[in-house]
Amino acid sequence: MYPLKYEGDIYRPPSEAKSLILQATVGCSHNRCTFCGMYKRKKYRVRDFGELEKEIIMVSRMMPKTARIFLADGNALSIPFEQLSKILSALQDAFPQLERVSLYGNPQDLLEKSVEQLRELKKLKLGIIYLGIESGSAAVLKDINKGVTPQQIVEGASGAKEAGVPLSITVINGLAGAEGSEEHAKETAILLNKIDPEYLGLLSLMTVPGTTTHRRFKEGLLTPLNPWELLKEIRMMVEGLSLTSCVFRANHASNYLPIKAVLSQDKDRLLAELDQVITKKAPGSLKSEYLRGL
Ligand code: SF4
């Protein structure tokens, strides 16, 4: 492995498993979502450029053929445009075979960058933004303290679309409990149709002790969905989707039924498969580790 010292735990999307990970920020600039405990122990800051540049040069000597780089932490897209441009330029200079740089972003970060700036970042090989929207429902977004409205999410995402930077959007299955499941699914489909992302990733809610969401479930203010209800929620969302060419994945460790589909061509097949699993309640089709206690 490369000799990098990371501050605290590092998270990355499953699809970045083979990428070199550089920590450009520490923590998350928002850090207030009620379900998220990932960066609670970190105080957000953008890392000093000089310090990061030294790391880039050192790693490039050891791994000169690196083609893909993921910039951690929580939302490296929060880095102001000038500094992010400097980081991307330094990466291009250091790694001659660099194909793509990716990072996590919040909808707020997109709203803070102009289309022109996003175009510049794309020229510097920003190749994909992993955008956590979690839900398309105004009520759910408010409840989880996401800090943005559906309308703001659409505005931010449309800037990336206009600049030609692909978006990989994350939604959380089961986030609103049984009480808000239908609204969460239907409103998320409506929002996704407005954004029309290139990629869509679905995670299942895993409540984290110490978070407000965990407490709400524990106190009975929200009712957790069982695996079949989670699948019904996915079905409701998929049914409402009408996307141009979106790769849909629900193959994270948290998901009960691994799904991979291109929605424009596989939607009917996916709905039929979901129906089959839901109506038969066929445990063999779900990951065994999640079936204990059913
Ligand atoms: S979900 Fe994303 S934006 Fe919200 S606190 Fe966690 S890392 Fe930050």
Image (tube, grey):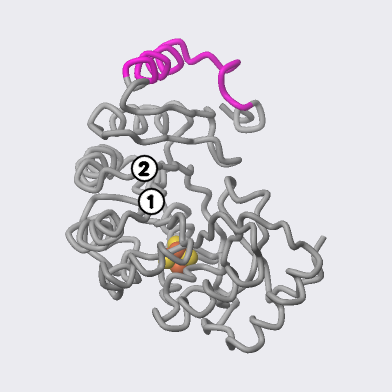
Would you say 89 lies left or right of 278 here?
A: right
- Crowd class of label 1 (few under 14; some 14 to 19; many from 20; radius 10 Å): many
- Do callouts 2 and 1 mark residues in contact (Cβ within 8 Å)? yes
Would you say 264 lies left or right of 128 here?
A: left
From the image, give the main secondary structure of the stretch colored magenta. Answer: helix
Quadrant of image for the N terminus: bottom right
User: Is 279 contained in the magenta span?
Assistant: yes
Q: Which residues are magenta?
A: 268-287
Instruction: Please provide percent x and percent y for residue 113.
Output: 30, 73
Q: Earlier in the sequence, mark 2 or mark 1?
A: 1
Helix, strand or loop at label 2? It is loop
Give the quarter of the image for residue 146.
Answer: bottom left
Instruction: Please provide percent x and percent y for residue 154.
Output: 22, 56
Q: Quadrant for ligand 1?
A: bottom left
Give the quarter of the image for residue 47.
Answer: bottom right
Give the quarter of the image for residue 174.
Answer: top left
- Label 2, on which residue? 198
Relative to 268, say whether 178 is above or below.
below
Relative to 203, say whether 42 is above or below.
below
Question: Disc number at residue 166?
Answer: 1
Residue type beneath disc 2? Glu
* Residue in the picture at 30% in, 69% down: 147
Quadrant of image for the C terminus: top right
Instruction: Please provide percent x and percent y for residue 8.
Output: 68, 73
Asked if residue 212 can be seen in this view, the reply is no
* Residue in the picture at 60% in, 76% down: 41
Calculate the distance from the C-alpha at mark 2 to the C-alpha at mark 1: 6 Å
Instruction: Please provide percent x and percent y for residue 155.
Output: 20, 61
Instruction: Name the residue nearer the viewer: 43 or 57.
Output: 57
